[in-house]
Image (tube, coloured by chain):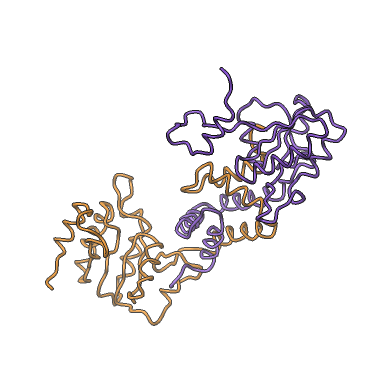
Chain colours: A orange, B purple
Amino acid sequence: MRNYPKPLQKLINEFAKLPGVGNKSAQRLAFHVISLTENQVEQFAKTLVDAKNQMKYCSVCGNLTDTDPCSICSDGSRRDDLICVVESPKDVVAMERIREFSGRYHVLHGTISPMDGIGPEEINLHSLIERLMNSEVKELIVATNPTIEGEATAMYISKLIKPSGIKVTRIAHGIPVGGDLEYTDEITLLKAIEGRKEI
Amino acid sequence: MRNYPKPLQKLINEFAKLPGVGNKSAQRLAFHVISLTENQVEQFAKTLVDAKNQMKYCSVCGNLTDTDPCSICSDGSRRDDLICVVESPKDVVAMERIREFSGRYHVLHGTISPMDGIGPEEINLHSLIERLMNSEVKELIVATNPTIEGEATAMYISKLIKPSGIKVTRIAHGIPVGGDLEYTDEITLLKAIEGRKEI
């Protein structure tokens, strides 16, 4: 036995394909699975397939959901005049965690990135335009990440939407709360200065 | 949506149960699974269940295997007079990697650890005694880890087997190749001095 028996090796290979899981971790995970009961393993396998089969994208906002439209789009208590544009479903969860935002979302599933061959057509932008037509939306908060691609996408959306009269805003960038000026990179510091407010 | 939709949250919870996987990693893994094709996810799920169902312990040596007896125990080209005792199936793979050992193995699945309530009865020791009876084994190499429990188990096995006339040896402990005296802990250094050889 130079290697593990085939069923175990196959499982190690499957784990090693996951992001951030190296060969050593994959071995540990595979041995852990072997040590579980049959029921537990079947439960795990079922959860994997169920998650893949039951999760879809909301036809309105593009968020990951198990109902269509998603729970946010179908929530009558939320404001219809405010949409927050984010890059990924994870960002929706992050925004929801602050328990302050009561508008709707629109998930782009990426950013415009000409270097990677991703143009405006490749992200979930077309449905945003459709959604804004004949809607009562008054403000669009663009909350893409402060990366080059995120900024470019924000600029693109701003130029595209502004002529329609809808207010387009960008989330603030600056020093994170608890951060330290001394250890803040130049660009963040520049953004912090640019975004200064009278107190 | 304060949390993720249920099928996704369930998958995150399953991943978070794995050793060394925190909540953030579990989220990343779950999102990765969602991004795979249905076929890939089903393949992953099948591999999990298959590994659990097809892997068993060899009735001779106790190693993890998909055949019984395992490929090592049924390999006619290996020496029958030499058995290496290890703690876990992973140790067998580690030993096999050096491509030098041509004897058989015996996997204990643990070590004697009175503190955790694990006595000689709780590890795969009884079958070792049975295996040694009326066998042609001449030497037993005890390759348990150099921990307190590993050492205690090695001592126990030695005292148990020696009266039968079988030679019991212990693998050497010392400074690892490429290691540095300066950074070696006292106990390892002590073992290295104790185990010194004439050159």
Find the residue positioned furthest to the top.
B199
Q: Quadrant of residue A178?
A: bottom left
Residue A149 seen in render: yes
Which residue occupies 50% across, 43% down?
Answer: A22
- Percent across and percent down for residue A197 are 14, 69
Q: A54 or A164: which is nearer to us?
A: A54
Q: B142 or A79: which is nearer to us?
A: B142
Residue B65 seen in render: no
Work out which quarter of the rendered image holds the C terminus of chain A and state it: bottom left
Give the number of marks.
0
- Percent across and percent down for residue B108 are 71, 43
In this rendering, is residue B101 above or below A38? above
- Percent across and percent down for residue B135 are 85, 31
In this rendering, is residue A146 above or below A25? below
Q: Quadrant of residue B98?
A: top right
Work out which quarter of the rendered image holds the N terminus of chain A and state it: top right
In this rendering, is residue A134 above or below B74? below
In this rendering, is residue A82 above or below B58? below
Find the residue positioned furthest to the bottom.
A77
Horizontal relation, residue B108 to residue A85: left or right: right
Q: B183 or B1: which is nearer to us?
A: B183
Horizontal relation, residue B175 to residue B128: left or right: left
Which residue occupies 22% across, 68% down?
Answer: A168
- Percent across and percent down for residue A20 are 46, 48
Find the residue positioned furthest to the left.
A198
